[in-house]
């Protein structure tokens, strides 16, 4: 049994890849365009031609695809074999046999593997490094593959104090329950996360409008809920902690987008050198 499979069986890790596999069934041009917009806005450019990007923890492969469509040479990898399969499926659909998009299995906690990849103009890891079980180590490893003058684009869950600790308990419980009983955690969590938008839509006489129009980073609302509730291991940090961590390594903060809510992800773009 692989290390990944052992962690799943022990209830110590969420099967992100299987959730992404289901997401591919609802992936469409609009969601891909939204992902491209997310990259353009944070990187402040719509043209990645001539640049190399590594997607650490590529998940569904959506943002690797977006980067390819913007012109980048892309290396995608993930610890979860199902996520690797998702990214390979998107490569097959949109860029078959393209040697400038490589997809492989690997870990952000494996320095020899990362060293073998070389360095990149853009190191991208959205909502991943806080799920490794060793977030600060993963953050350091990600920095090592950024070229001088290159950029590091990461997102990390915001430290919301007691709220974050409560969600840690929910996530741990979800993963340790038998699969047939996980709905006992998932459905109440979904209600907690969405009741305010739902009530607001009803008051405005537009029921389910926000659910139908949900397009955060190209995701679907239900797959995002499952990803959030199940997302374990789970670590958090304040924006200041992330900035203080990278400054001594020679990184300067170019752009930061705070979490949309207390429990969301803070997004950072750092420049090396």
Image: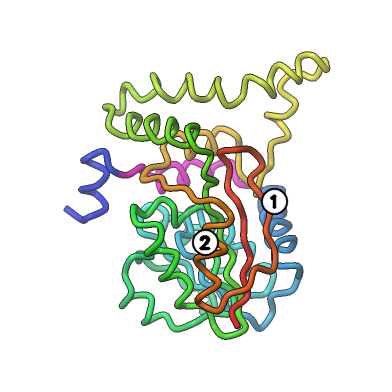
Q: Which residue is identified by label 2?
A: 125
> Can you see residue 45?
yes
Q: Distance between the residues labelled 2 and 1?
A: 22 Å
Q: Which range is magenta? A: 13-27
In this view, 220 is above or below 156 = above
Label 1: state its secondary structure. Answer: helix
* Residue 126, placed above or below residue 169: below
Q: Residue at x 39, y 68 (%)?
A: 104
**Within-10-Å neighbours for mark 1: few <14, some 14–19, many 20+:** few
Q: At which x and y percent is residue 188?
A: 48, 19
Q: Which of 134 and 17 is in front in this view?
A: 134
User: Does 22 appear in magenta?
Assistant: yes
Quadrant occupied by the C terminus: bottom right
Q: Which mark is residue 29?
A: 1
Which numbered mark, 2 or 1, is in the foreground of this view?
Answer: 2
114 inside magenta stretch: no
Q: Which of 93 and 45 is in front in this view?
A: 45
Percent across and percent down for residue 163 are 50, 32
Picture residue at 28% right of the left edge, 27% below the top = 177
Q: Residue 49 has which mark?
A: none
């Amino acid at each position: 049994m692989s290390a990944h499979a052992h962690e799943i069986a022990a209830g110590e890790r969420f099967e992100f890849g299987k959730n992404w596999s289901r997401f591919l069934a609802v992936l469409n041009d609009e969601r891909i365009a939204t992902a491209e917009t997310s990259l353009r806005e944070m990187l402040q450019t719509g043209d990645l031609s001539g640049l190399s990007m590594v997607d650490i923890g590529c998940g569904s492969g959506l943002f690797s695809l977006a980067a390819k469509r913007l012109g980048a040479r892309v290396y995608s990898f993930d610890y979860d074999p199902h996520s690797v399969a998702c990214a390979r499926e998107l490569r097959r659909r949109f860029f078959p046999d393209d040697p400038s998009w490589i997809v492989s299995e690997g870990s952000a906690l494996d320095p020899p593997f990362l060293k073998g990849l070389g360095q990149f103009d853009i190191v991208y890891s959205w909502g991943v490094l806080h799920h490794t079980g060793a977030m600060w180590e993963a953050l350091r490893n990600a920095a090592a593959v950024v070229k001088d003058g290159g950029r590091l684009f990461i997102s990390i869950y915001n430290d919301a104090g007691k709220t974050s600790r409560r969600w840690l308990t929910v996530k741990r419980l979800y993963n340790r329950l038998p699969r047939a009983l996980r709905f006992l955690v998932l459905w109440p969590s979904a209600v907690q996360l969405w009741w305010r938008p739902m009530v607001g839509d009803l008051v405005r006489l537009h029921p389910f409008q926000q659910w139908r129009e949900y397009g955060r980073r190209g995701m679907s609302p239900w797959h995002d809920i499952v990803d959030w509730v199940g997302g374990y291991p789970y670590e958090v940090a304040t924006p200041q902690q992330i900035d203080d961590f990278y400054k001594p390594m020679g990184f300067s903060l170019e752009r930061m987008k705070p979490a949309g809510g207390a429990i969301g992800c803070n997004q950072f773009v750092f420049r090396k050198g």
